[in-house]
Amino acid sequence: MKMDFKIWSKGSSEKTFTNVIVCVVFISLLASCSNTKYLPEKETLYVGSGIKYVSSDSSAKSQKAVLKEELKLIILPKPNSKILGLRIKLWLYNVAGKPTGKGLRYIIRNKFGEPPVYASMVNFEKNRTLMVNRLENRGYFKSNVKFDTTTKAQRTSAVFTVKPGLQYIIDTVNFPKDSSVLSKAIRTVTGRTTLKRGGAYDLDVIKAERTRIDARLKQSGYFFFNENYLLVTVDSTVGSNKVNMYMELKKKIPQQARLPYRINDVVIFADYSIASDTSFSKAKATFYDSFYVVDPYKKFNPRMFKRNLRFHPGDLYNRNDHNLTLSRLVSLGVYKFVKARFEESDTADGIKLNAFYYLSPNSKYSAKAQISALTKSNNSTGTDLTISLKNRNTFHSAEQLSLSGFVGLETQVSSQQNFGTKRFGGDLDLLIPRIIPHIGFGKNSDFVPKTRINLGYEYFRRTDQYTLNSFKSSFGWVWNSSITTEHQFNPIALNYVLPSAITPLFQKGLDTNITLARSIEKQFIIGSNYNFNYNSQAKPNRKRNNYYFNGNADLSGNILGLLTGADVLNGKEKK
């Protein structure tokens, strides 16, 4: 083994350190001084704004840091970015100059550089107005904001002086008091209101309360209601920096929005496409249980929909069941598009909805082939071929059957002997979109739990040594507790390995090597296993800081050992 060490003397270390400091100072001066020489005539470089917070109120001081950061975010545009205190990107932009093509200058200027932010681009008065508006939205109705700009060495900065005054506090909150059905419904959901007496006035909280009431009403049948139908007026004349709030219904609200709706007919277009005829006729549909299925070619068993639909005739419309049904239909894996539409029915009372579901299936069959080649440092070469077939609707209830077959060859050529292996086999995997046996698990989940049955076989032959026949089988369940988390539990997992055609020469090696002998001995393993999978990338629109974790717990062999009384430590091994 060869090891190299490099030892620095004290003198050389000090010299190197000094050189580094000189380089850093030189680059700093170059980047800071040279940026201004590229400025056009009568332009200055905008280097940022600060906020001076002036307040004598103790309660306001506790919110000072939060409010200052919030106001800083309002100021636009942002100055050129800094790296270690230097505007390196701006410097690269300036140094590159105007490119004439797509060469190095273009790459430096447009990929790594950053165009200058001039002071003339900043509308300080507009930023001041936006700050005043934000303060008023937070309850500081008597706020005052001024700004002052300073230009020095062709660099312009600004300071905004903020005097927020006292924040207004909620004294009373009043909800609609008339005797209409809608007003009564609103009063029933005010128990968990976010507008509390003694709380600070905050426009975002008011908006959140309107959204909350709308969501609760959607749970009570008010399909056509909208949060914009709620109006909140504020009386700030009560004194002592307090306000009274009055939530009211706007006068011009459609009659539809004032009444709760129930479900009339549920219609499923099970094989929908853009070219499909969506005109509904009960004569052309199949009635099953409590809903209609439009499926001219009988591709899907209606029982599949019964397990996943949450609306039935007479049910009060609610948004949770609306979303739950869509999520479960998507998670079946047989549909690529799922859409729901609700419309008023033409019943006598006129306060019922017909629910229409448009389901566009994926292709029933898919196939995939994969071929690979390998070479190893021990002179081994080989190839593998895998062919997979998938049926997404095997028994007409979204059962997914996957079949795969593989074959592989590997040869090792040396100066003395030829060794080779060959393998082939197949795998069958069946996913059934329900729990077997039926125990009601996951009935109210957004994701349909599935039963998984797996069978597999592999033949492995090593030339002039031995043959292995391996069989495996498992039965279990797969379910999601969230969009990022998947569980798989196999209460039964079987593995059977049968060696054969062991050559006499190889047998001699087995007789003297216990470890090698155990690796190819006859085995029958029965047990259980559990797999946990977490993948943050499953969340929509998540682009950064993703995490993946996969964990397994395997009890294979332990169960059979307990049943047969095996005890390896005490010499009671079972074969």
Image (cartoon, helix red, strand yellow):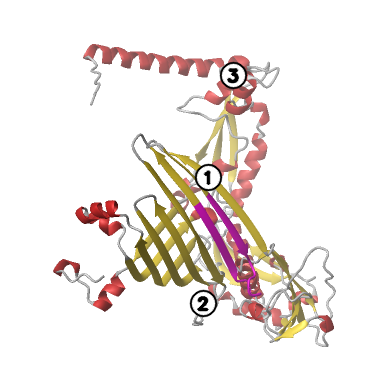
Identify the residue at horizontal 38%, vertical 67% (top origin). 495
Name the kind of residue labelled 2 in the image: Ile
**Residue furthest out toward the front:** 504
Q: Secondary structure at mark 1?
A: strand
Characterize the local packing of mark 3: few (<14), some (14-19) or many (20 or more) Cα atoms within 10 angstroms: some
Query: In the rendered structure, does residue 148 fall within the stretch colored magenta?
Result: no
User: At which x and y percent is residue 11?
Assistant: 24, 11
Residue tagged 3: 154
On the rendered structure, is 59 left or right of 539?
A: left
Query: In the rendered structure, does residue 406 fall within the stretch colored magenta?
Result: yes
Residue tagged 1: 372
Characterize the local packing of mark 2: few (<14), some (14-19) or many (20 or more) Cα atoms within 10 angstroms: many
On the rendered structure, is 556 left or right of 392?
A: left
Which of the two marks, 1 or 2, is nearer to us in this view?
1
Q: Nearer the viewer, residue 555 or 214?
A: 555
Sequence-first tag of 2 and 3: 3
User: At which x and y percent is residue 454?
Assistant: 49, 68
**Residue furthest out toward the left:** 570
Q: Nearer the viewer, residue 380 or 444?
A: 380
Could you tell me which quadrant the N terminus lies in?
Answer: top left
Residue tagged 2: 435
On the image, which quarter does residue 335 sit in? bottom right
The segment highlighted magenta reads 385-407
> Can residue 151 be seen?
no
Give yes or no for contact between labels 2 and 3 (Cβ–Cβ under 8 Å): no
> Can residue 485 be seen?
yes
User: At which x and y percent is residue 49?
Assistant: 55, 33
Identify the residue at horizontal 25%, vertical 21% (top origin). 4
Sequence-first tag of 3 and 1: 3
Identify the residue at horizontal 35%, vertical 71% (top origin). 526
